[in-house]
Image (cartoon, rainbow, N blue to C red):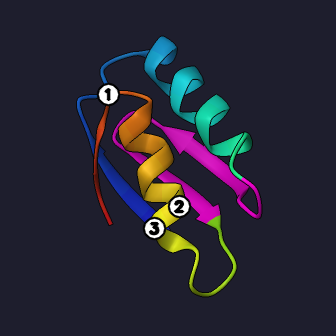
């Protein structure tokens, strides 16, 4: 699942999003770059990944 993310500008942003996603149960982080994250999420738990990104201070567009 690719989640587009607004508000990311640098590698510090990438690290912050990656850390938030890695703490989210069931989420496997494939890649995080400025502007998006590719993750594997169990069916029905997509909203948890999106919320983790929000809590990290960014605007996800799933």
Position above or below: 56 against 62 = above
Report the residue marked by disc 3: 47
For marks 1 and 2, the one nearer the N-term is 1
Gap in angstroms between the C-alphas marked 1 and 3: 19 Å
* Number of residues whose C-alpha sits closer than 10 Å to that of mark 1, classed few (under 14), some (14–19) or many (20 or more): some
Marks 1 and 2 close (CB-CB < 8 Å): no
Position above or below: 53 against 1 = above
Report the residue marked by disc 1: 8
Q: Is the magenta stretch mostly helix, strand or loop?
A: strand
Instruction: Give residue 37's position: percent from left, percent from top.
Output: 50, 50
Marks 1 and 3 close (CB-CB < 8 Å): no
The secondary element bearing badge 3 is classed as: helix
* Number of residues whose C-alpha sits closer than 10 Å to that of mark 2, classed few (under 14), some (14–19) or many (20 or more): some
Gap in angstroms between the C-alphas marked 1 and 2: 19 Å
Marks 3 and 2 close (CB-CB < 8 Å): yes
- 11 vs 43, left or right, is left
Q: Magenta residues, as a range?
A: 25-39
For marks 1 and 3, the one nearer the N-term is 1
Which quadrant: the C terminus? bottom left
Report the residue marked by disc 2: 48
């Amino acid at each position: 699942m690719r989640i587009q993310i607004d508000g990311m500008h640098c590698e510090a942003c990438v690290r912050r999003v990656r850390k938030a996603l890695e703490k989210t149960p069931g989420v496997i982080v494939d890649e995080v770059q400025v502007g998006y994250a590719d993750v594997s999420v169990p069916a029905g738990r997509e909203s948890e990944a999106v919320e983790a990104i929000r809590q990290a201070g960014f605007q996800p567009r799933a």
